[in-house]
Image (cartoon, rainbow, N blue to C red):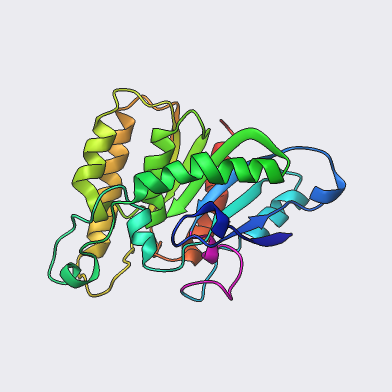
């Protein structure tokens, strides 16, 4: 079951709705469920709200797992379908420079700290007041959503038991993100990180495939040094930068968090 809820009263620019997946039988049971908070919620379930005509199909993935008697979850998909996502998904302004980026990415970013605080202080309390949730929370996101997941999951590692980074757009503010991760001598976090070997989010930037892959590998090596509780890294040899490939890898993330 999927519910779409207006959250304008929570006052976060760009985030007017959340899409909520509830496991089958939710309303006929009394049990509490673990929750996964996901960014780009408009691309998770409903083709009518998707930005690129593709969805993860999270409801189908979890529905199949339920039939296999595996663990299931409440999913909170936070919609942000506009260019505002570039600003609220990064705590730092865009520092990526090439000829094309001057007009597209300049002056974006810098609101990620505010967004993370909003999730902790307003969204999570609203969700936990409205639904039967356990105290086990997770977060996942792709591309720019991977950046805000990494920042939020590390900053609030006491809130989230594990996080999933799908094809993170580290390039957007790489020097700042690297310094942020380096600033932690030890992290109380469990992290799933993946990347496709054929990724690009902009065909006009000719070396984007190499940038995505090399940045993910560099971040993996940096995280390994941080004595994480648990970590899984995966490279998809055929992986491209879209919802269909993230959907194929979502079960890997679920398998990972179910070992924590």
Residue at 48%, 41% (x, y): give it: 163
Vertically, is 119 above or below 56? above
Q: Is residue 201 visible?
A: yes
Residue stretch rendered in magenta on the structure: 40-51
**Residue 13 x/y as whole percent:** 44, 59
* Residue 214 appears in view: no
Q: Residue at x 60, y 52 (%)?
A: 76
**Side of 122 where 21 appears, left or right:** right
Q: Residue at x 45, y 26 (%)?
A: 229
Residue at the left extreme of this rendering: 99
Q: What type of secondary structure mainly makes up the magenta span?
A: loop
- Pick whichever, 129 or 134, lies toward us: 129
Please identify the quarter of the rendering in which residue 9 is found: bottom right
Q: Residue at x 53, y 62 (%)?
A: 16
Q: Quadrant of the N terminus?
A: bottom right
Residue 146 placement (x, y as % from top left):
40, 51
The residue nearer to you, when weighing 208 against 44, is 44
Q: Using the image, determine if residue 117 lies above or below residue 62.
A: above
Relative to 205, 133 lies left or right: right
Residue 93 horizontal/vertical position (percent): 23, 53
Residue 167, by quadrant, is bottom left
């Amino acid at each position: 079951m999927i519910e779409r809820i207006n959250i304008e009263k929570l006052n976060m620019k760009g985030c007017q709705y959340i899409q909520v997946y509830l496991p089958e039988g939710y309303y006929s049971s009394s049990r509490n469920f673990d929750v996964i908070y996901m960014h780009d919620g408009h691309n998770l379930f409903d083709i009518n709200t998707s930005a690129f005509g593709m969805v993860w199909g999270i409801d189908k993935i979890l529905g199949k797992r339920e039939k296999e008697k595996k663990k299931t979850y409440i999913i909170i998909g936070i919609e942000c379908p506009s260019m505002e996502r570039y600003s609220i998904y990064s705590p730092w302004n865009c520092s990526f420079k090439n000829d094309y980026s001057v007009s597209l990415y300049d002056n974006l970013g810098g609101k990620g700290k505010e967004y993370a605080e909003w999730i902790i202080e307003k969204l999570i309390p609203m969700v936990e007041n409205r639904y039967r949730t356990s105290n086990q929370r997770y977060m996942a996101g792709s591309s720019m959503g991977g950046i805000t997941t990494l920042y939020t999951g590390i900053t609030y590692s006491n809130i989230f038991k594990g996080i999933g980074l799908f094809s993170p757009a580290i390039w957007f503010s790489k020097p700042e993100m690297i310094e942020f991760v380096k600033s932690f001598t030890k992290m109380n976090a469990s992290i799933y990180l993946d990347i496709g070997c054929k990724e690009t989010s902009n065909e006009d930037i000719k070396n984007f495939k190499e940038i995505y892959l090399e940045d993910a590998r560099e971040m993996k090596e940096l995280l390994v040094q941080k004595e994480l509780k648990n970590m899984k890294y995966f490279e998809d040899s055929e992986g491209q930068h879209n919802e269909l490939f993230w959907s194929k890898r979502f079960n890997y993330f679920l398998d990972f968090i179910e070992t924590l």
